Image (tube, rainbow, N blue to C red):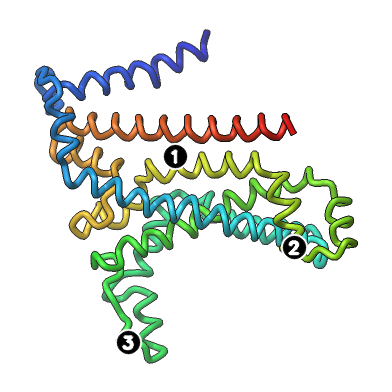
Amino acid sequence: MPGLLLLTIIVLVPLGWNFFLTFTKYRGIKPPVWIGLDNWTKLFGDDVFWTSFGNSIAMIVAMVVVPTLLGLVLAAMLFDLVGKKFGGKIASFLRATYYLPQILPTVIAAIVIGWILRPENGALNQVLGAIGLSGLEHNWLGSPDTAMACIMVIMIWVQLGYPIVIFMAALQRVDPELYEAAELDGANWFQRFRAITVGIIRPEIFVVTLTCTIAALKVFGPIYALTRGGPGTSTMVPSYYSYSEFFQNQQVGYGATIATALTVVVAVVAIIFITFQTRLERQDEER
């Protein structure tokens, strides 16, 4: 009962109120005015909204695709190669090093990266000038051509440690005799990785992919700290667009509509992932 009460107060009631606001015109001061589906009609014709969801695809690449694939390979290398050759302590130290950006507050990490990428006295431009590559100096976060790419690189750095830790924990349950038998049969590291590692830790791969996809769809902190969705709308994402409508433009009803649309997308993605994972598990049991 206490858990149900907290869930109702903290999640369900605000969610219901937010959904109600999607059918109203509300500036946060006077009572909401019912306008029906006007906010939803505006949403589907809003170019900024669709641009923000297009930018979410870039966030999925940076926070899901690259970290998951790279994290899977690095975790397998740390566990199967580094751990055997240099010992478990070295592998654990490297794992902690990769995970370090995850324990930093996102906004703090973004601010530090922002200092590095400053156009006037940022560390990156100064290093380029010092080594004779001043022609490559650039306003990295202030140019539409490079702003999203910079955000993607930052998110890969921040996100990489999470799949590494999850996958290395999953690898603890892999029977070492499987690797030894495959090695005796002449399998190289990549063949062992493909045939044994990926198959056994597939449930963890689904978990990492799902949680990282949800995080990518609702990413907010780095955008708020570094670009505020700019320049223009080149780094605008749905969560920041909703925030800007809520608190900057005082269009609470429309901001609630954006947030609700994002919630629906996250729920649909979660259902698809879980359904696909369940189907694969049933196929494995039938075999």
Task: Locate residue 17, reporting x and y percent.
Answer: 27, 18
Identify the amino acid type marked 3: Ser
Marks 3/2: CA–CA distance: 38 Å
Task: Locate residue 183, reporting x and y percent.
Answer: 86, 62
Residue 214 numbered mark, or none: 1
Residue drawn at (78%, 60%) of the image: 83
| Residue with the mark numbered 3 | 134
Marks 1/3: CA–CA distance: 39 Å
Task: Locate residue 280, reporting x and y percent.
Answer: 63, 35
Residue 90 numbered mark, or none: 2
Secondary structure state at the residue bearing disc 2? helix
Identify the amino acid type marked 2: Ile
Classify mark 1: residues with Cα within 10 Å, few (<14), some (14-19) or many (20+).
some
Name the image quarter holding residue 189: bottom right
Marks 2/1: CA–CA distance: 32 Å
Secondary structure state at the residue bearing disc 3? helix
Q: Tag 1 or tag 2, which sits nearer the N-term?
A: 2
Identify the amino acid type marked 1: Ile
Classify mark 2: residues with Cα within 10 Å, few (<14), some (14-19) or many (20+).
some
Q: Depth check: give the residue in front, 234 or 133.
A: 234
Secondary structure state at the residue bearing disc 1? helix
Which residue reaches farthest bottom?
132
Q: Along the horizontal axis of the image, is 56 left or right of 44?
A: right
Classify mark 3: residues with Cα within 10 Å, few (<14), some (14-19) or many (20+).
few
Q: Which one is in front in this view, the residue at disc 2 or the one at disc 1?
A: 1
Q: Which one is in front in this view, the residue at disc 1 or the one at disc 3?
A: 1
Residue drawn at (41%, 30%) of the image: 267
Q: Tag 2 or tag 3, which sits nearer the N-term?
A: 2
User: What number of labels is visible?
Assistant: 3
Q: Are marks 3 and 2 in contact (CB under 8 Å)?
A: no
For the C terminus, the quadrant is top right
